[in-house]
Amino acid sequence: MLEKNVYESFKKIVGDQFISQDPAVMDTYAFQWCNEIESAQRGEEPQRFGVRPLAVLLPASLEEVQAIVRLCNEHDVTFKAHTTGMGPWAGVSNLRSIQIDLRRMNRILEIDEKNMYAVIEPYVTNAELQSELFRYGLMHHAQGAGPQTSPLASHTSFVGPGFTSPYTGFSGRNVLGVEWVLPSGDILRLGSYDYNGKWFSGDGPGFSLRGIMRGWLGAYGGLGVFTKAAIRLFSWPAPKDWKWKTGGTIPNYDWEVPPYWQLYVLNFEEWEEYQSAMYELNDREVCMVATTSAPEGLAALFTNTKTEAIEAIFAGLLARTRNYIVVLVAAHTRREFEFRAKLVKLILEKYGGNDLIEEGVITPKPMHYGETVRNMLGAHAFRFSNCFQSTHGGMDTISMAVRLAQLNQPVKQKYIEKGVIGDDRGLGVWITSYESGHMAHMEVPTVYDPTSVKSCLGYAEYQDECNKMDLDQALGMPFFIVGDEVHEFYAERTMHYPDWLRKIKASFDPKGLSDPSHYVKGVKKDK
Amino acid sequence: MVSIMTGIVGRDDVSDNDDVLSKYSGKTIPSLVVWPKTTDEIARIVRWANLKKISLLVRSSSGPRLRGDWFPKVENTIILDLSKMDRILRIDPLNKVVMIEPGVTYGKLLKELTRKGLRPAIPFIPEASKSVLSACLDREPTIMPRFHWDSSDPLLCTETVFGTGDVLRTGAAAGPGSLEEQWASGQAQKNPQGPSQFDPFRLVQGAQGTIGIVTWISMKCEQLPEHHKLYLAGSDNLNDFMDFNYAVLRRRLADEHFMLNKVNFEAAIASANDIPEWVLVIGVSGHGMIAEEELEYRTGDIMDIARETNIILHDSLGKIKGTDILTLLNKPSDVAYWKLQVYGECHEIFFLTTLDRAKEFYEVFQNTANTVGFPIDQIGAYIQPLAQGTNTHVGLDLFYSPEDKELVEKMISLSSMGQAQLLNRGAYFSRPYGFIVDAVFKHASSSTLSAMRRVKQIFDPSNILNPGALCFKEVLQ
């Protein structure tokens, strides 16, 4: 329990209305997607409930967040920041913990149209930011988790692929500065903002403190609370007079596709041709989207209901779909569009592929164009089950992504045959490129049944086998290599990097109060 | 000390000869120069230096020091000259990446990359002897903002010996697996982030050698274009280019994209009559299939933007042809660095801002020059948009003759007063050198200084790496 005086002190910071210990409210923070997998991996009975926080606080300002963190330090209370979080990493792990829910900090503070950056608070969602940016002809890198999620969380604290990654990059590389309440309660402002109040650079003077902030994966809330972030923006490829127009109702709403946009599904018989085409499409900067999933995934992407997806599958989609790239060409001008469209066709011909849209195998509706750039398509994966999770996830080159996909298939098939995960013939993958193909990653979305102990344990075993394969075959470090035990599993063959992480944690969070469950626990500093 | 170093690197690669030491000396003379050739040798030296509390300063380039700060700041410093580590370890055209050691110069790299159909992100006409790795570590601006996604580009992965003597490969290079195993799995050390939940490459980059010693890097490259054109525009007002610049940067249409004032244009490129006060340089290219059509579409859209923003682009400026400038931009400077050719010496000042404020800062600096009596026509300016236009490097070059003692004094006054003025008005000295270092860190919040010192304590707890640099003023005991 939280001592009464401590609770009262917290209440004084945020006010009566914005603190709760209601068990029903606490349960909503403890009930998280994929908790059943993590509990299975810990050798416990799979369950979706994690640890319940002792209280939830809803601060409204930097000052309130700082006061909460300082009070946590005073009374040895662990804390975890929360925005739109979903997953075990969103909850707390220590029994003496509070949850800092940042949903009241939801303002877009600045949009610098010319210099192309926005300054946002934690609970601004992708949908809100995107809507505001359209009036300036701009867009941001929205992570694949969807329009309802927090871009600040992705840019500061979590992995950041998205459907538009070839064009908008990766969340962690688009950060221009942050306002950051360190675990001690000190406020750190990175880069130019600390010097002149402007957010155009997050690096220096000297080295960049972004180096301790997140790395590739993000610190998952294990190193303090981010209260503001400046993120890079990108040109929205549409003529100046184009307006966002929708009609109809969900799920069959309509959307006015900008004039120089075209979706393709470029299908290749073999991975070799796929890989060559993926490299060339990206290098030539013709794609806003270049992504790959399973044939079953293609049915899910461009239909509106489970029934429609199944009908598409039975209409022959599986038989005609091999290794494909969903390509979105999105141009600003007719000249740009004609060049890009011509090049896509030439690359398709060069590598002997066929366009499944042109052949009528699948037909995206206008809303699917909108959902592609709103990162809604990921949600379609939930249609076949109420749950999936990803294994693997290393990020480096397109070649590595393809190799991962090839090596994964027989492993996944083994668990499909055991009946513990969904049957996609082992082909279920998600590949995307970043920064015009300079990087790529592959992960394996895998459907399982969260209500079945056998399925949860089976999925957990599959994930463990994938991790071992990634180690043995040098296939990069997956998304979910976080937390002490998993870090340690990787340490020996990754130059013992966790030792450095632990030193950072110990130095910046000597009391270990910023929830370390999906980061790392610190070590005592050398005397 | 000599015998220990000789034991590690061999007699031929250690020197305490006065003539040699003088080449590495500023106010303080180093005690020794050592030329290690392997990561293991460097790690052994660093571990020994930790035990003995001996400071180490790394040099990789052999050219002139225009920032006046790359010399020992404390007594009894050993110089680690990495110029003999000069191998290009790997070129991977498919993944557009090269892996290089510290001693690789732009001259050497350009030649090899061209053979493989690649081009690097290159600074504006660098010194021939400039270490590519050093430029990347110093976040040196490059001339193609379209390919500059993150301020850290084109730097990707590194192998670093930290101040503790521990070796870590950063980014995806950390593993799993050795480099050879990673190559076999299709990797190419392209993801600079990590390993895992921190970015150590961002801690060694910009650190001026205070966090670790980098023994190789992987670096982003681009395909060599088959068709490449250069366009020029002139104006007496830098802000005349503003709308054009922002529109082109937003669309990522151009390759080379920067501005020079007349002084720098004449110093770096060519002299001619009627060169305007400012010259805008725009390169456009196409490569691969239908390369010519790519060039046409990019050029067409750029010309449309130029018309809309009242900019007239030419393929030459008087007798100076764009094609000739393009040749200059794709090779290092002549043996005599262009910044030294006119007056013999140059003092560099640079900072970050946004493009819309570059003119304001330039004028502030000119006013200070007038105040101290430094001639305006000896101040070169180079305006380089970065990070696809999100921010802008402003470089100011003070050209002077070292024999003109009066002018040297004025240069020193201008550097000191001018930078202080710029700092006070919001110029961001993200890579501080020389006069401005202490003033920059006085502007920093206590949290920033505390965080930097904690990082330093983790990675170089004995403060043996370039002590006295940045905000790390502690003296070795």
Image (spheres, coloured by chain):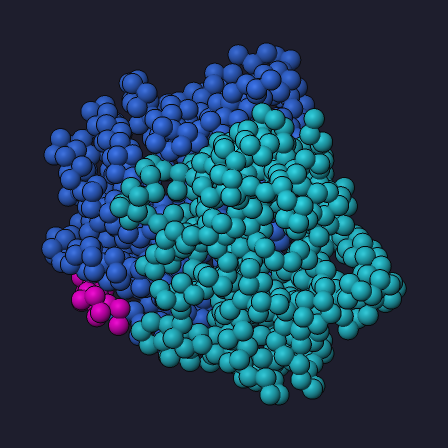
Count of numbered tags: 0
Q: What residue is at 30 percent from the left and 43 percent from the top?
A: B180
Q: Quadrant of residue A72?
A: top right
Quick one: which chain is cyan?
B
Residue B364: in sight, yes or no?
A: no
Residue A35 screen position, x and y as percent: 35, 27
Q: What residue is at 40 percent from the left and 72 percent from the top?
A: B225
Looking at the image, residue B17 lies above or below residue B124 = above
Q: Quadrant of residue A482?
A: top left
Q: Nearer the viewer, residue A39 or A435?
A: A435
Q: Nearer the viewer, residue A228 or B358?
A: B358
Chain A, colour shown: blue
Is B152 one of the magenta-colored residues? no
- Along the horizontal axis of the image, is A354 left or right of A335? left
Q: Nearer the viewer, residue A456 or B435?
A: B435
Looking at the image, residue B232 lies above or below residue A14 = below
Looking at the image, residue B393 lies above or below residue A480 = below
Q: What residue is at 63 percent from the left and 28 percent from the top?
A: B53
- Along the horizontal axis of the image, is B37 left or right of A490? right
Residue A220 screen position, x and y as percent: 47, 33
Write the start and end of the magenta stretch as one range.
A346-367
Q: Nearer the viewer, residue A278 or A139?
A: A278
Q: What residue is at 50 percent from the left and 61 percent from the top?
A: B106
- Along the horizontal axis of the image, is A2 left or right of A317? right
Residue A98 screen position, x and y as percent: 53, 22
Residue A8 screen position, x and y as percent: 64, 17
Residue A94: in sight, yes or no?
A: yes
Is A349 one of the magenta-colored residues? yes
Q: Quadrant of the N terminus of chain B?
A: top right
